[in-house]
Amino acid sequence: MKRMALVEVKNLSFCYPNGYQAVDDVSFTIEAGENIAIVGQNGAGKTTTVKMLNGLTKPGSGDVLINGESTKNYTTAQMARRVGYVFQNPDDQIFNATVYKEIEYGLKKMKVGMGECERRIKDAAELTGMTKYLETNPYDLPLSMRKFVTIASVIASNCDVMIFDEPTAGQDLDGLKILSDLNRVLTARGKAIVTITHDMEFVADNYDRVIVMCQKKIIADGRTKDVFFQKDIMEKAMLKQPALVRIATGIGMQENTLDVKMAAAYIRQNLR
Amino acid sequence: MDSIKITDLTYRYPTADEDVLRHVSLSVEKGQLCAVVGANGSGKTTLCNAIRGFVPKFYKGEISGEVLVNGKDVQREEIGITALEVGFVFQNPFTQISGITDTVYEELAYGLENMGVEPAEIERRVEEIMGLTKIEAFRDRDPYQLSGGQQQRVALAAVLVMNQDVFVIDEPTSQLDPQSTDDVFEIIRLMKNMGKTIVLVEHKMEQIAEYADKVVVMDQGQIVLEGTPEEVFSDPRCEEYHIRLPQCTRIALELKKEGIGFEKLPVTVQETVETIQAITGAGKDGQERKG
């Protein structure tokens, strides 16, 4: 018998009440411990797809199975324990007076015990660089850091699947480093991370697998290295290959790599 | 003449214990695109607010030094008058969009209506800018019903339509996909060609390398590096100031470490390919990549 995937998305489609079709027949699976990037143009259907993973948006047709069971059988509260979603705009989900209370809020709703609650908040704050801001009002933090407040809340909820919608937007180098590190720690803990982003260099540096969406459909799902070197797919999705890929293509490199050091070593070896 | 001239500007927010801008001096010539980069919290947005006069007029606080826009002292001028000279695009499109209009078209017309522009002229300008920024397709939609990226283009368009001489643009592409990011930079290039002076806060170094005339790096409220993209990105202190170098520059620096030097640091893909070809002869004799 085939091993059961953590999440199985089967032929998902969604049409908004006004008749606008946002997602058209999308299927993929997610394993525990996987780190997946979803890329595509604005309006390609990325956010609608991931919202259907945690039930914020009910699938129009098709199904999402978590541990083999259809999410149609879960309540929204039950779903929230399995799939956590970090909104694109952090201000859509922040409403508590301190960072600590914001992270604590969901845990209280889930009736997590006090000691465990504290432990999880401390852990989530450390992973997101929020430790020194726990008593700060989230709205006194810049937008890029408010995003980490919302990420911390989802980490603390300890879901099996965590979805980050555009966490790279507006991040500086330090923010990207925090993000990269927390992805690594969480996947090592067996969490599945799904990240929507427009930052192709960040994807090249941090994700083994990438899903490319274009006009409501998935047009590629595979190893990032393989996908990013396919110019036709990237162009069809109106995405830009990372500079390294364009350079490698430009100089006729015979090896697909997304690693700057490896590319430099290749160029040196091929000096004449 | 310099469009923007900032001299020894120091500023502290009302409740803060420290200065957020410290002895900042900066000149931007007419028609120049000046990119401001640096870690979050280094003072980039505050600097933008000082050029627009929001600092100190809206935010209050203590200020010393001078900001001249087109020769006029922003701190002495009415904030509404400065609005006619400086177009300001907020970092967060959710903040920028007025919330009182029902359609994208009305959102673009709103500022012009407030300035008492003739209806025929409003229509002409709104149509022109919608075309330029490629937002005609959602002209009749509610701005708040658009995706983050679409809202960001509407926010930019709503400021462009005002047609000031100087534009301060704070992270206009943070929510945008790569294609729309390039579209925005093409709009910015167009504005530059029209002689507009632009101060741009942006984290996307690849585009900065390609489009900016001048880059200033901020760190802890100070301007710590200033120069052309080549000059700034080749400065080893970029690392210390947490600047994410363009991938091209990272490859070039890595090659340097491998003992392969070159006179001028390439900062765009085209330059990098040419530089590597010049050194290695790669890709010159018709060798093709395997599929």
Image: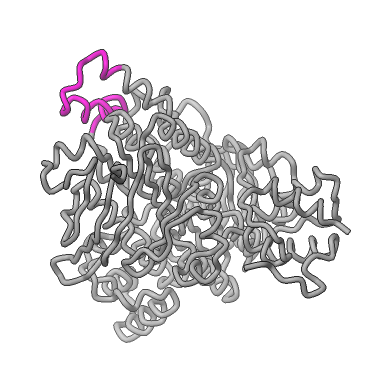
Q: Is residue A159 left or right of residue B91?
A: left
* Image height of B278 relative to A171, above or below: below
Image quarter of the N terminus of chain A: top left
Q: Residue B184 appears at what percent x and percent y? A: 49, 67
Farthest residue, direction top: A115
Q: Residue A235 appears at what percent x and percent y? A: 50, 71
Q: Residue A72 appears at what percent x and percent y? A: 12, 48
Residue B120 visible within the image: yes
* Image height of B129 relative to B199, above or below: below
Specify the color scheme: one colour
Callout count:
0
Farthest residue, direction front: A1
Q: Residue at x 40, y 66 (%)?
A: A219
Q: Is residue B60 left or right of residue A256?
A: left
Q: Residue B197 appears at what percent x and percent y? A: 58, 65
Q: Residue at x 49, y 49 (%)?
A: B75
Front residue of this view, candidates A20 and B214: A20
Does residue A114 show up magenta in the picture?
A: yes
Q: Residue at x 18, y 40 (%)?
A: A79
Residue B81 visible within the image: no
Q: Which residues are magenta?
A: A96-118
Q: Is residue B59 left or right of residue B48?
A: left
> Magenta: predominant secondary structure element?
helix
What is the quadrant of residue B8 in the picture?
A: top right
* Image height of A253 relative to B218, above or below: below
What is the quadrant of residue A225 in the picture?
A: bottom right
Image quarter of the C terminus of chain A: bottom right
